[in-house]
Amino acid sequence: MSWAATVLTLYPEIFPGPLGHSLAGRALKEEIWSLETVNIRDHANDKHATVDDTPAGGGAGMVLKPDVLAAAIDTAAGEPARPMLLMSPRGAPLTQERVLQLAEGPGAIIICGRFEGVDERVIEARNLEEVSVGDYVLSGGEPAAMVLMDAVVRLLPGVMGNALSGEAETFSGGLLEYPHYTRPRTWEGLEIPEVLLSGDHGRIAKWRAERSEELTQDRRPDLWAAHKQTKE
Ligand code: SAH
């Protein structure tokens, strides 16, 4: 059975967008995963198809109505039960670990907010998991949903040409990845590190492990501290 994504959005025409190309696009054609969109506006319940309203308590912007959003969520929910994710800057930061868990499951229902966000009661009543793609604010959840699906889809069996290329990757061992090089051997006077041309697999592995640790220490003290702790 293929990994099934259902995206709830006010802009279904945005999808699949970048996910229709390259690895993810090929996998979509091959039905390794599927992508269905639900237009939240189709679940409005008045003749103007109203999806938002002014914030209780006042202030700028508009808030997605709970009744309309819940109706959209309820049509998407079904068997097998899938995690219901609300893209939100307040959510738990998305990690490779969570991405891997999602890839091992049946799929996901992904809700894209707009405007000031969604009525808090829907989050509670439908037990939505809030997921953030980073500490910055987007104008809508759609790019965040694409980030999440892209990260998941590349891990699905049969998507990456070389199944091993995911293993040494950044974050997989809690470290950033070592640097890559390819031909030409000399480019703008810059050489490929000699060890990589040595054919000595032991030395190469050691060099890569060292660069990986060095980069992590340098750029991501947070990851480095966590890595040292798990090693102890
Ligand atoms: N007023 C809200 C931000 C609303 S941004 C707040 O301060 O929390 C509008 C929508 O964009 C959100 O509902 C969410 O779906 C999406 N969004 C914005 N930033 C995001 C992020 N970092 N990660 C995931 N989704 C995000």
Image (spheres, rainbow, N blue to C red):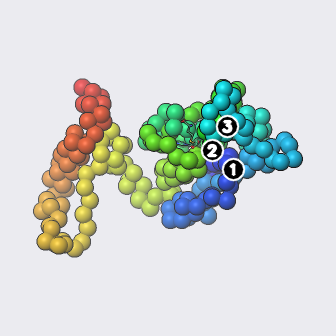
Q: Is label 3 in a helix, a strand or a loop?
A: strand
Q: Amino acid at mark 3?
A: Val
Q: Residue at x 27, y 27 (%)?
A: 229
Q: Is residue 227 left or right of residue 39?
A: left
Q: Which quadrant contains ligand 1?
A: top right
The one of 192 and 44 positioned closer to us in this rendering: 44
Q: From what the image shows, is residue 90 above or below residue 18?
A: above
Q: Quadrant of the C terminus?
A: top left
| Disc 1 to disc 2: CB gap under 8 Å | yes
Q: From what the image shows, is residue 134 above or below residue 158?
A: above
| Disc 1 to disc 3: CB gap under 8 Å | no
Does the beta carbon of the residue at mark 2 sit less than 8 Å from ligand 1? yes
Dot 1: within a 10 Å radius of its alpha carbon, few (fewer than 14), some, or many (20 or more) residues? many
- Residue 140 on image: x %, y %: 58, 47
Q: Is label 1 in a helix, a strand or a loop?
A: loop
Residue behind mark 2: 114
Residue behind mark 1: 10
Question: Which of the two labelled residues, at mark 1 and mark 2, occupies the earlier sequence position?
Answer: 1
Disc sitting over residue 71 in the figure: none
Does the beta carbon of the residue at mark 3 sit less than 8 Å from ligand 1? no
Q: Amino acid at mark 2?
A: Arg
- Residue 161 on image: x %, y %: 44, 61
The one of 7 and 99 positioned closer to us in this rendering: 7
Question: Which of the two labelled residues, at mark 2 and mark 3, occupies the earlier sequence position?
Answer: 3
Residue behind mark 3: 63
